[in-house]
Image: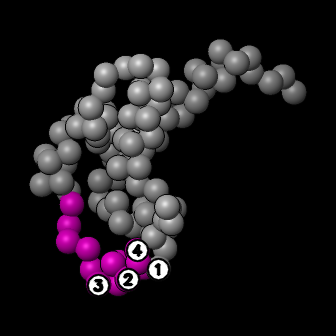
Amino acid sequence: MTLPTKEQQTELEAAAFRRLLSHLSNRADVQNIDLMNLAGFCRNCLSNWYLDAANEKGLDLTKDESREIVYGMPYDEWKAKNQREASAAQQQAFERNRPQE
């Protein structure tokens, strides 16, 4: 087995991230609260991680800009098109599974 070089690893990770964003874009029916309840992260988490990485590199990216990168459109537009009110069961599950700071 040949392990990828550091440069290849970065390229592969970037490709996997782009594929994840594409998958999430195609599954707008999957709500962020469902992702949080099942996986402990959501689109907002990804956008925050992206923003953190940009800031670590000294890039002047805003929260709105990082969200637009992850959502593929302005966040408010995505919410208006796709976000539904969370059910009581979803909210209860979120409270049980809420990430601890």
Residue 26 lies, with reference to residue 56, above or below; the image says below
Query: Which is nearer the eye, 89 or 27?
Result: 89
Kind of residue sitting beneath label 4: Phe
Q: Secondary structure at mark 3?
A: helix
Residue 75, position as x, y percentages in the image: 20, 45
> Could you give the CA–CA distance between mark 2 and mark 1, rounded to whole angstroms?
6 Å
Q: Which mark is residue 86?
A: none
Q: Are marks 2 and 1 in contact (CB under 8 Å)?
A: yes
Residue stretch in magenta:
83-95
- The rendered magenta stretch, by its main secondary structure, is classed as helix
What residue is shown with label 1? 96
Residue ID at (84%, 22%):
2
Residue 41 lies, with reference to residue 10, above or below; the image says below
Q: Are marks 4 and 1 in contact (CB under 8 Å)?
A: yes
Query: Which is nearer the eye, 72 or 94?
Result: 94
Mark 4 residue crowding within 10 angstroms, few (<14) / some (14–19) / many (20+): some
What residue is shown with label 3? 88
**Left or right of 71 in this view: 38:** right
What residue is shown with label 4? 94
Colour pattern: one colour
Instruction: Please tell me whether residue 94 belongs to the stretch shown in magenta.
Output: yes
User: Disc 3 or 4, which lies upstream in sequence?
Assistant: 3
Residue 28 lies, with reference to residue 18, above or below; the image says below
> Could you give the CA–CA distance between mark 4 and mark 1, rounded to whole angstroms?
5 Å
